[in-house]
Amino acid sequence: MNKIKKILWRAGLAAGTLGLVIAGAAAFSAFEAHVVNVTATINNATTISTTELTFGNVFPEEILHNPVTLSLSTSFLSTANTGATNVDYVIKQKPKCTVIANSTGLLPPYEQVTEDAAGNFICPANYQAMPLLCPYLSKTSTNTSDTSISAFHGPLTGWTNTTSNTYAAVGHLTAASPSTTWDIDLHTPCFSGQCSQDWASYVRTANPAVTDPTAYEASSTLAGVQMGCDLWYELTGVNNGQSTAAPKVGANFSSYSAPTCTTTVLAEGTIQTAIDSAAGGSTVCVPSGTYTGPIEVNKNITLASLSGPSATIINGGVKITSSGVTVKGFTVNAGIVSGETNPVGFYVAGGSNIIVNSNEIIGVSNSYGVVFVTGASYSTVAVTNNKIHNNSTGIYTNPHTGTLAINNNDIHNNIAGIGGVTGATVQYNEFNGALAEEAIGADTTYDGSIISYNNFLNGSKINNYSAPSIIQAPNNFFNVSAATQAPTNVNTTSVAASQFAHN
C-alpha cells in the first residue's frame, strides 16, 4: 500500500493594487522644504485556498483528481483598480520536507524547502526530503491559454530550482475571465518489477512525449512509504494586458564595452606578465592586438579586452586555476595548456564565481572549446554570451560536482556542441550546423541536467548514449521535429512553435 500526501502552498504573492497619492508638488530649490504625502493601499491580487490536498492511501496506476480554483480578488476587480487588468502566475513544484527528529513532539510534521545560492533545495534542520511525488502530478487548467503540465515529467530525484522552473504550469487571469480551475491529478506509479502489462500505455496516455515509461517506475523500496510534493503558487506579473516577449537566444557582442581598468598590458609586455604582477581583485585590461598563449589566470582578477573579441586575439588557449575569475572580450584560438592533451580554448580547473563571457572561441579538429575537469568542484560558474565553433567538442562538461550555467551562446559547426552533458543548465543557446548533427550528447554520466529554451537548427540533435534517466529537454525549438532531432529517451514536452529570436 502506497500512502501519498500532497499540500498546496500559497507563496510569493505580489501586491495587487497600489494607490499612490502625491500632494504639494511645488518646484524644489536648495533652501525650500516641502512635505510630500505618500499613501498606498496594498491588496492581494488573487485568492486561492491553501487547504491541504490529501490523496491518502492509493494504489499503483490509479488516477485521482483534486480541483483547485484561482480567482482574482475582490479588490482587484473593484472600480478602485484603474490600472491593472491581468495577472500572470506560475504553479511550481518543490520537494517536501518531513521531520526526522521529533522526540519532544513540538516540531510540525512537515516543513518547506529553502534554496542555496546555486538553486539547490534544502530542508531545515531535523527534516529530510520525502520521496518525490512531483513527477507524477499533472496540472491541467480549464483556460486554454494557460500552459498545463502532464504527469510523468522531470527526473525522479535531484530536483533543483531550475527543474522547478522548467516544469512550472503557467496561468493567466483577466478581469474578463477572473477565475480558473486547475485539475491536480495524481497518476500513481507502479513499483519496479511489479508493473502491469499496460504500464506503458498508462504512462503514454497521460504524457505521449515519454519515450521510456520504465523510467517512471518507482523503486519497490517505496511501497508503503509516504511521498510528497509541495505546489507553490507564485504571481509573476500584474499588468495591463501587454504580453511578455519570448526569450531571445544566442550571443551578441555589439553591446561589449571596455571595463574600468586597474592595470593595462603594456605594448612591449605580455598578458601573462600583467596577470602575474596584478593584485587580487584587479581588472587587467588588454589593448587590441594578437597575443601568444597559453595564458594562465591563477588569481581572482578580471581579464578583459579594451576593444572586444574581433580586435583582441589570444593564440594558444586560456587556463583558469583560481576562483573569482572573469575572462571576457577575446578571440581565443585553441592551443595546448598544461593538464590537457587536446587543444582547448578555455580549461577551467575548478573553483567558484568564474565567468567566461563575450569570447569567440575557435577550435581545430581535435579541440575542446571549453573543458571542465573530471572530479573538480564548481560553484557559480557561467559560460555566457560566447561564440564557440569549429571544435571537436564545443563544451565538455565532464563529471564534476556543482552546476554550470551554459547560457546565451552560439554553439555552431562543432562535431559535438556539448559533450557528455552533466551538472549543467543549458538555456537560451543556439545550436546550428553541427558537423555530425550532434548539438548535445548525454552518456552514462547524465544527471538530469535541464536543456531548455534553445534553438536546435539545421537538424542538430540531442543524442542519448545510455543516459541513466530520461534527458530533460522541454521548451526548445527544433527546426525539423523533436521526434527527429531528439529521437531516444528525451523529454521534449512544450516544444516551441516557432524559432526563438536571436540576440
Image (spheres, rainbow, N blue to C red):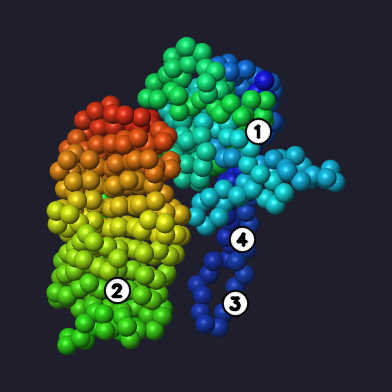
In space, the residues marked 1 and 2 are separated at their CA atoms by: 51 Å
Q: How far apart in space, not on screen, are marks 3 and 1 (Cα)?
A: 54 Å
On residue 38, the disc is 4
Local secondary structure at mark 2: strand
Q: Name the residue under label 2.
A: 296
- Label 3 sits on residue: 33
Q: Who comes first in sequence, dot 3 or dot 4?
A: 3
Residue 7, disc: 1
* Structural distance between the alpha carbons of marks 3 and 4: 16 Å
Disc 3 residue crowd, few under 14, some 14–19, many 20+, Cα 10 Å: few
**Quarter that holds the N terminus:** top right
Earlier residue among tags 4 and 1: 1
Identify the amino acid type marked 3. Answer: Ala
Judge the density around disc 2: few (<14), some (14-19), many (≥20) Cα neighbours within 10 Å.
Answer: many
Q: What residue type is labelled 2?
A: Glu
For the residues bearing labels 3 and 4, Cβ distance under 8 angstroms: no
User: Could you tell me which secondary element the residue under label 1 belongs to?
Assistant: strand
Dot placed on the residue nearer the N-terminal end, 1 or 2: 1
Q: Is residue 428 left or right of residue 75?
A: left
Residue at 24% in and 79% down: 271
Q: Which label's residue is closer to the chain start, 2 or 3?
A: 3
Vertical relation: 46 (above or below) 425: above
